[in-house]
């Protein structure tokens, strides 16, 4: 309710990632909604991994993030928790349409992200959908017009955005680019550029990658605003 939301927003405003950086250990210490916390607890997620400790606090504050961390380090929760919380903070309801877009290179990875989202978001009221092709475009179109959070592959998402009566994106709060390095290796640069071109520039962007490369840095320059760089020892 309103009071609960205001107190949550107050907690986020007061939260200083620098102060909590060294002591942060468990999800209960974060300024996040009790719904998300319940979802995490029921999925047996208790302590944050290193990449989660570094990226979630700053992402909760609304910063753009460019994080590099190896496979298996826990990047999925590092972007899903701030994504869900951004929608709560911005008072997005199921009637507000598309509010978060999560791009992943393959159908298999998109399905994995979607499964984790369903688990930890099960006490939240948002609608979420998977867009990876394989289904009839019109069928997908009808469904996605009702979704707050979409998880999908670059090709199919850009296809929907480029349709004559494509997705409405004016309410978009968060863009996640997961496995950005792999997306580029697979040749999705054009589709990702096209997706970014359709989105409001006021959004928050979270870019995650297992490795760094010049092309990932180029994508970061194009998609991020004053990003916090995480897991990177040297950078410009
Ligand atoms: P990445 O995307 O970096 O490859 P994943 O997000 O897929 O990593 O997570 C790898 C594994 O670690 C998954 O099985 C996931 O359930 C588990 N995991 C992630 N975060 C936590 C955590 N905070 N506590 C316990 N297990 C976690
Ligand atoms: Mg991953």
Image (cartoon, rainbow, N blue to C red):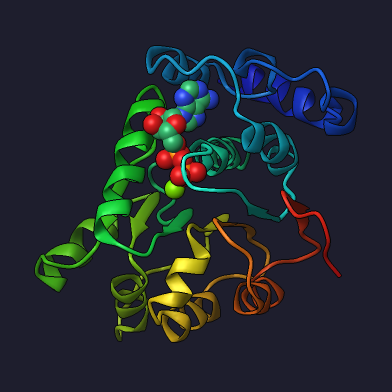
In the image, residue 236 above or below residue 99: below
Tell me where residue 87 sits by quadrant: top right
Q: Nearer the viewer, residue 102 or 138?
A: 102
Drawn side of residue 92 relative to residue 154, left or right:
right
Q: Nearer the viewer, residue 118 or 179?
A: 179
Q: How far from the left and from the top, in percent, is residue 50?
A: 66, 32
Residue 26 visible somewhere in the drawing:
yes
- Residue, far right: 19
- Is 82 drawn above or below residue 134 in the view shown? above
Residue at x 32%, y 76% (from the top left corner): 155
Which residue is drawn at the image coordinates 35% and 84% (left, top)?
162
Q: Position of residue 49 (x, y in %)?
A: 60, 28
Q: Is residue 53 left or right of residue 107?
A: right
Q: Residue at x 30, y 62 (%)?
A: 106
Give the x, y percent position of residue 210: 54, 56
Task: Locate the C terminus and report the quarter of the image it occupies.
Answer: bottom right
Front position in the image: 140 or 45: 45
């Amino acid at each position: 309710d309103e009071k609960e939301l205001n107190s949550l927003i107050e907690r986020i405003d007061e939260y200083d990632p620098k102060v909590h950086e060294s002591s942060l250990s468990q999800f209960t210490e974060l300024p996040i909604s009790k719904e998300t916390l319940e979802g995490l607890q029921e999925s047996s997620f208790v302590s944050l991994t290193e990449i989660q400790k570094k990226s979630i606090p700053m992402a909760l504050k609304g910063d753009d993030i460019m994080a590099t961390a190896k496979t298996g380090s826990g990047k999925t929760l590092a972007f899903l928790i701030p994504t869900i919380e951004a929608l709560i903070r911005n008072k997005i309801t199921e009637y507000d349409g598309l509010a978060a877009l999560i791009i992943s290179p393959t159908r298999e990875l998109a399905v994995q992200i979607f499964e984790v989202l369903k688990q930890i978001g099960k006490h939240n009221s948002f609608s979420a959908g998977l867009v990876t092709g394989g289904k009839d475009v019109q069928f997908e179109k009808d469904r996605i017009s009702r979704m707050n959070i979409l998880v999908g592959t670059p090709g199919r998402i850009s296809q929907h955005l480029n349709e004559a009566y494509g997705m409405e994106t004016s309410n978009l709060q968060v863009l996640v680019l997961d496995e950005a390095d792999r997306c580029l290796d697979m040749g999705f640069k054009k589709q990702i550029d096209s997706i970014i071109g359709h989105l409001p520039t006021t959004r928050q962007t979270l870019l995650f990658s297992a490795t760094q490369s010049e092309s990932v840095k180029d994508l970061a320059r194009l998609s991020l605003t004053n990003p916090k760089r995480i897991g990177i020892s040297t950078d410009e």
